[in-house]
Image (cartoon, rainbow, N blue to C red):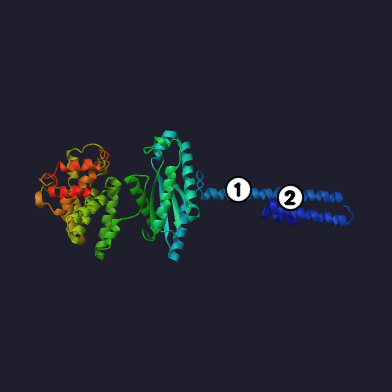
Amino acid sequence: LMPVVIMALNYGFKNAFTVSLLSIISLFAISFINGFLSIEADIILSGVIFLLAWLLGNMTDTEREIRKELKRLATHDELTDLYNHRSFQYLLDQELLIAKKNNKSVSLIIIDIDYFKFYNDAYGHQQGDKALKQVAKLMENVVDIQGMCARYGGEEFTVILPNIDLSGAKRIGEEIRSKIEEENFPGSEVLPKGKLTVSIGIAEYPSNANNKEKLIQMADEALYKAKFVSKNKVETYYSVFDELSVNLKDQEKDLFNSIKALTMVIHAKDRYTYGHSERTMELSKQLAERIGLDKMAIKQLVYGALLHDIGKIEIDREILNKPTKLNKDEWETMKQHPRWGADIIRPIESFRGCHDIILYHHENYDGTGYPTGIKGLDIPLGARILRIVDSYDAITTNRTYKSAMSKGQALEELNRFAGTYYDSWLLKEFIAMME
């Protein structure tokens, strides 16, 4: 009996049944040799052996299944059966340790379902849960053995991709995005784009971040940019701040990092500024190159365009995001942000050339602007360029109180104020560049 009991308790019914069968065969073989003198006792004993194998073996199998299910519940999301948030954190820690040891890459994808609250409100949480499971299945089919999928929380998912760089991760991200866009989700026609879509942010270790917290933050920033710009989009992390910091003196880098942190605060306070600074920077650079500015002037214009709204750190969130027209006091406060921004960057010697660009970027050519009211060619060239580009981006971007204009409408609107708000020659060049 003891071998059967040991096998049943340690290995379950299948192995215990095999041992019990061998024991019964051995028992009847001995009984045969002895002329079946104790056949009745042998039959009873055989029943006891089999009963023990069945009873104890099934108990062990049941306990093993319960343990397995409890372990799965501890590591997996109950709804989608992907890894849960705790497991995601642990797995990312482990993969980063391996990557660091072997000098390899780890890419992180963060996925967010667009307008999912709208979908839940329209069809209820049960239908929403079905959509989450459908999205999870599509993700797993794309990623397969290349990485690990997890539910980060709510309608957010993550994918850890060991030994895959940013370009490889973007390819996988695009495939996930397109598969979900093409999938038929019941009721998705009520969503703004007529289908259920996702926005995706991607960052890579070690090129974008040197630890887990930074990697998650960078991927989240890329996701935020994807959602803010257009949704249904894949964005890889990129920060022009990282590029600019390379040219700074060592003693200036701490202050610059503080300024970078301030811009993140502004982005959190005023969603419009997210992406606006980088867009105006790019268009300002293109216009400067078109009119033949030298490299140093272009560099200072790039710095100025990137940092031109940093003075908004001093303005309350309620004013920045007010959906209606500002009152007199609020407008007077808003008009101070160029002056405050210029004061913030003043201590950094490398930014000295962009001080006046930030200070005067809201001055009008006819002298009706702010904060000082200077006019004409007294306004620095970089500030005159930024005045045009800043206005263009403002009127071609959706705001809480105004819908975006098309490119053609925007250029026509700017042209109405040639010679009053804007330098006529620069505006003519800008319109030609955009057309």
Number of labels in the image equals 2
Q: Which residue is mark 1?
A: 66
Q: Is residue 412 visible?
A: yes
x then y, percent, for residue 424: 13, 47
- At 43% from the left and 58% from the top, the residue drawn is 164
The quadrant of the rendering that contains the N terminus is bottom right
Q: Which residue is mark 2?
A: 52
- At 51% from the left and 49% from the top, the residue drawn is 76
Of residue 263 and residue 137, the one placed in the foreground of this image is 137
x then y, percent, for residue 318: 26, 41
- At 47% from the left and 46% from the top, the residue drawn is 138
SS at badge 1: helix
Name the kind of residue labelled 1 in the image.
Answer: Ile
Q: Residues within 10 Å of mark 2 (few under 14, many from 20)?
A: many
The answer to whether mark 1 and mark 2 are in CB contact below 8 A is: no
Residue 295 in which image quadrant: bottom left
Q: Is residue 113 left or right of residue 242?
A: right
Q: Is residue 313 left or right of residue 149?
A: left
Q: Which mark is residue 4?
A: none
- At 58% from the left and 50% from the top, the residue drawn is 68
Q: CA distance from mark 1 to mark 2?
A: 21 Å
Q: Earlier in the sequence, mark 1 or mark 2?
A: 2
SS at badge 2: helix
Q: Is residue 208 left or right of residue 56?
A: left
Q: Is residue 337 visible?
A: no
